[in-house]
Amino acid sequence: MYWNSLSEVSTQLESKNYISTDAINMSVYLSAKLGKPLLIEGPPGVGKTEIAKVLAEIYHTDLIRLQCYEGLSVEQAIYEWDYHRQLLALKLIEGDQFSVQEKEGLIFDDKYLLRRPLLQSISMDKSPVLLLDELDRADEEFESFLLELLSDWQISIPEIGSIQAVTQPHVIITSNRTRELSEALRRRCMYLWLDYPTLEKEQEIVRRKVPGINEVLSTQICAFMQEVRHMRLNKVPSIAETLDWAFALSGMHIDYLERSMVEDTLGIILKDWKDIRTAQDSLSELFDKVGVIQKLPS
Amino acid sequence: MITRSTNLSDHIIAFCRFLREHHFATGTIEETDILRSILDEQILRHDESFALCLKSHLCKSRKQFVAFDDLYHSYWRELDRATDSKIKESEEEKQVNSQKKPPPIQEIKDWLYNGQNDDTHDIAKESAISATHTQNGLYTDERELKDIFYLVNQIIQKIANRRSRRYEHSHKRGPIDIRKSIRKNLLSHEEIIKLSHKVKKKNIKVVLLCDVSKSMDLYSRFFIQFMYAFKRLMSHSELFVFSTKLYHITEEIDSNSLSSSLDMIIQKVHDWGSGTRIGESLESFVNDYGHRCLNSKTVVFILSDGWDTGDSELISRHMSIIHRKAMKVIWLNPLMQNAEWKPEVLGMNSALPYIDLLLPLYNLDSIKKLVKANL
């Protein structure tokens, strides 16, 4: 148990510059208390991965990250035998009078086992934070492999048997919902949905992450981003884009939003040419909503 | 609220039961976890933290996460009704529901079965186009369905065996499969001479969107048979029909027989044979089902003639999204049986840039052509 109280979660997360909500605090608290994995879903760039990074810092432990992708296999995620060294060892003992069982025992030894992130995470003396990032990108078969680990905290290796977890890792699973994760996996996890931040929360994040930014500019940027997210876009900008934009404008010593400046820097927040065109077309409307006074060309 | 004289654990269990009625998968594991959590006094100190605790344990998807707050409040507000799970409709609700009743089932069944519906008739009649086969005595209903199954199976095999680009054979061979190589050389060689390379097939998912508007009258039944075969042979398929609205019919078609599937679809699809709003239907597909149905392993089949009375801008916008997210978009148009057909209607024209393959589908022969196509 890492937390003494709910308020401690909030304080600790904020001390690491992670602006949390009550729902985040509760999920992190209960997931640590009950030792259950935390499944975080939400659009890209809302701070899902960041939670795992911050928790590793707070727990003073290692962060083991497994970036999931299509075609990720068990060998890359759990374990693999070091076949080259095994073959070499077999060659070396070829002439020796070992029985088949003895030879097997020699080559299927722990020293020939290459521990990949999942096996590594249950073999450590101090519980690490295990981040299974973008699990929705991995194949469904891989998800099934995870079930044994997440419910029994053990991994079965046919040649050796089951390996029980030395310590139970703090598992954080993230998904961008490009496909629906299985019901079986969901039921083994605590669930948290992270949406785009509210205006107040986004302002707080910008203030924390971009020190020295002009207050007016920060408020205008956040209000502008909130409005942009209501538009029909192919790629909705996230907090990461807000921060990039805030850094860029603040770095240029700009104190308030100006039409020409916004037009020139739209590429920082929008990553699709159609989206940029849509935003350019409705810039006046956006400025009206945000309350930015537009200077008319003289 | 929480300091009621009744037992809190009983209420939690009753609340879980209430959520189950609203399609939450809450079982004993969740109930036990909540009871373990509330041993912590902090959780019970405030109503908000108690609600958040339940939310963290009981929600397993975004939809549930969004719906939870309303359900939570309505449960505790109407505790007595929720606890015994016997929520009675108010008179007003009853009136509203009675107004929304679907058209008489028998009427639609008669239409579907060409007025020859009876209980022993357990498969739908063939489409009007393929009726020529029946007249020639070549096909009976069951025979036709069997043939559709056979051909659809070939389509599925073709799609399923399509190799991922990452593992496709090329001059540069794939990564060495050491286990396979050792097995291969175990009996005949002391040294590993013959190497095996990894080959991986993609797990393809199929989504079928079928137009059941008035203009598709002639083909709807044939298309439903086609979709039924897909679902029976490829359990991962997701099926939808649309005319002015989109309906998800995977569960309905997953039942035992085509006849009972049809009955269930009829009850569900209120606007069968009415106007066509392809754009709105595609929008609803992308927004409501896109996140789980569309990915790089999805082949999307759209079965429609392209006649549309809605906004063509919506069609192109959502076709572009489907095209971007899915592996392949195949449009099957029954009107293409006419050699002089051109994609001139607005709906078809708007969708055309985002279609990977445009093929005819109107009878068994056209399915055979589909099998031969480069899917």
Image: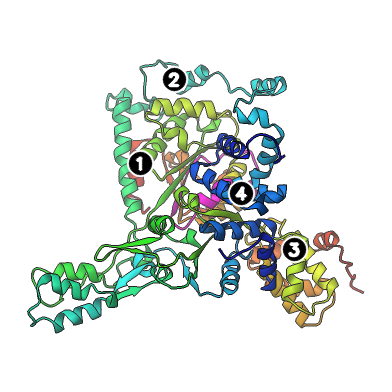
Which amino acid does the dot numbered 2 rest on? Asn
Which amino acid does the dot numbered 4 rest on? Ile
Q: Which residue is mark 3?
A: A201
Residue drawn where x is 29% and y is 39% of the image: B150
Q: Nearer the viewer, residue A21 or B363?
A: A21
Q: Position of residue A298 (x, y in %)?
A: 92, 74
Residue drawn where x is 66% and y is 73% of the image: A16
Say whether disc 4 or disc 2 marks the residue closer to the N-terminus.
Answer: 4
Q: Which residues are magenta?
A: B288-314
Q: Nearer the viewer, residue A203 or A146?
A: A146
Q: Position of residue B100 (x, y in %)?
A: 64, 24
Q: Position of residue B20 (x, y in %)?
A: 55, 37
Q: Chain of mark 2?
A: B
Label 1: which secondary element: helix
Q: Answer whether residue A85 is visible to the viewer in this image.
A: yes
Q: Which residue is mark 1?
A: B367
Q: Nearer the viewer, mark 3 or mark 2?
A: 3
Q: Chain of mark 1?
A: B
State the image quarter where residue B197 is shown.
bottom left
